[in-house]
Amino acid sequence: MCGIAGYVALGGAAVDTARAREMIAALRHRGPDDAGAVANGPAALAAARLSVIDPSGGHQPMTIDGGRVTVVQNGEIYNYVELRDELQRRGRRFSTASDTEVIAALYAEFGDAAFERMRGMFAVAIWDAPRRRLVLARDRVGKKPLYYMQHADRFFFASEAKAILAALPHAPGISTRALVEFLTFGYVAGDDAAFAGMTRVAPGAMVVLEPPQRPRVVRYWTWPRPPDAERQQPEYVDRLAAELDEAVRIRLRSDVPLGAFLSGGLDSAVVLALMAKHSASPVQAFSIGFGDPEYDEVEEASVTARAFGADHHVWQVTPDGMMIAERLAACYDEPFADASAIPTFLVSELARKHVTVCLTGDGGDELFAGYVPYTQALGRSTTAASRGMRALAGLGARCLPAHARGKGRLSTAALGPEAWFVWRRTVFPDFLLRRIAAPDLVRDIDALPEDDAVAGLVGAHGPLLGRLQRWDQHHYLPGDILVKVDRATMAHSLEARCPLLDHRVVELAAQQPAWRHGSATSTKQLFKQVAARWLPADILARPKKGFGVPLRRWFAGGAIAWARDILLDRRTSERGWIDSRETARLLDQHARGRRDHGKRIWALVCLELWARRHVDRAGNRERACA
């Protein structure tokens, strides 16, 4: 695992490594073991390396074929052994045992088709010297981040936005659309980053730069769509079990210690069971607790750990755990407000004391219809009578002021299944967003993100459950879940591997129609059939809890004063993004127990702390995640 960065001089002038070294210095948390930079004509590439595969021989940047191909990569190619064997049969010779050299050789042999052969998580930059060609590529589902931006006559790229900021004379402006999207969902999704002019390489895509031409985006993989009709596949459960088993097995390839994140849920239990199957010694498992029965899964996780003989490590988080918000703001260099980043950050800190790599259960809910909002959306009737009742509820909601009792309840009662699902994903629903956001923010965009999401779901093809899953796969998973895990783990130089998001597992999951995965009364129907091969019945039967945080209780206590000091500070008000009077109202209502605004207060705190770290410190070169 690594951080990568670099740039190309668009005019073709030769460059040195000085600026690339400044950029990579901002990413040393991602790769504390080694760092390097090379210049080749108009291109400079740099990497900070966390040594996992071939620690002694995998130095980056890696150059082959007499300087023709130079590669830096962040991630792991799990099938690198098989790919190296294939390349050796084609006459290739290797000087290291690293997967980075395999990437370079694959590109030398197959060009852009190399990425289709790779099974893993990766963000890759390749400088093709003879063609003066830069290729940026990102793994299929977006596990590893990769940003790019043109500034003056330089084209920059990096694993995190902070490395590009380190190369600029001043911070770029902030995207209005990104701010409104953050206030709506608590994260910024899509290809455009929070900083104006900065873009993310899309999952499953390449960005090819061949000056003087403009960069072009090329898709090499897209999420498979579920079939329209039922497909009888009696062998499906056997095939899925085999692919899951293989996905875990190849992710155990490591030259450093590894372990597992363990919640009380089904997905991490399956990963632990398969790790135990393939491990000669007890698996190191790591969990976080809150001392709150509504959120705490430590007891369930402990039962799972005992079932598979794992060496279980637990950290109990107290209300002052949210005081790590400033550390989170340093790591999440775009605004990010999923409060489960708190336990993810802390469990990563715990795990790094024992291991360098952890396997996780991320992705199972999106693939196999595991989220409770799926069942709830499916349960909302679409009969004429129910539509009439929703219309009446909507009329009543529009007649009430934004903070009147019953406004929220009537507003949600008025929603159809798609709109209700999107509402469940929001931090500030539209009627509150229009009050909390400064008027200029909302006025400057064509449509609110919530409205766009609902329109997209209503207009999409296929049954409701499949449409909801696809929205999560394209929006929530890469915009929230994978960002959360990547930044939290990399802040502690810990590599996270997600076997359920192996692309072969993803493609196999999509071969069944959505109704086989879930319904209005059940979740993960097919996945549970597979999991029953490895899990005891009591673990299999557990209800889903989710990876929540007791924000309501924490902000009802001493943390509300901390939040008030930040949000009612003059700097926050002068930023011009948020209405201070509305913020004070939210704080007061929560403190008095009249409303639960926990996640909204947390989002506003995260936004302000992010701005202080990454916007106000425009001239500060200390960009490291610390």
Image (tube, rainbow, N blue to C red):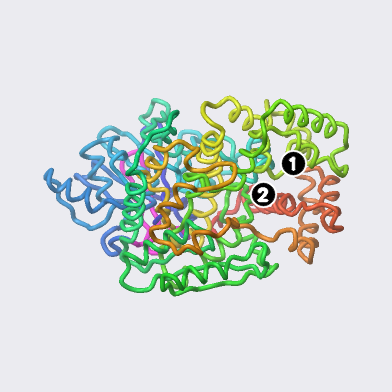
Element at badge 1?
loop
Question: What's the magenta region?
Answer: 29-52
C-alpha gap between disc 1 and disc 2? 11 Å
193 and 498: which is toward the camera: 498
Taking depth in this image into account, of 204 and 64 the one nearest to the observer is 204
The residue that mark 2 highlights is 611
Residue under the point 40% across and 36% down: 205
- In the rendered image, residue 69, in percent from the top left (x then y), is placed at 26, 42
Residue holding disc 1: 577
Picture quarter with the N terminus = bottom left
Q: Is 31 displayed left or right of 166 in the figure?
A: left
> Is 279 located above or below residue 591 in the figure?
below
> Against 229, is 124 above or below?
below
Please say whether residue 241 is one of the residues in the magenta stretch: no
Question: Where does residue 304 sit, x and y in percent of width and height?
Answer: 48, 68
x 37%, y 63%: residue: 275
Residue in view at x 37 percent, y 42 percent: 508
Q: Amino acid at mark 1?
A: Trp
Query: In the rendered image, which quarter is residue 574 located in?
Result: top right
Q: Amino acid at mark 2?
A: Ala
* Left or right of 440 in this view: 238: left
Circles 1 and 2 in contact, beta carbons < 8 Å: yes
Residue drawn at (30%, 71%) of the image = 280
| Labels 1 and 2: the sequence-earlier one | 1
Could one spot residue 59 in this view of the protein? yes
Can residue 174 be seen at all in this image of the molecule? no
Residue 205 versus residue 325 in the image, above or below: above
Q: For the residue carrying disc 2, how many other residues have a C-alpha within 10 Å: few (<14), some (14-19), or many (20+)? A: many
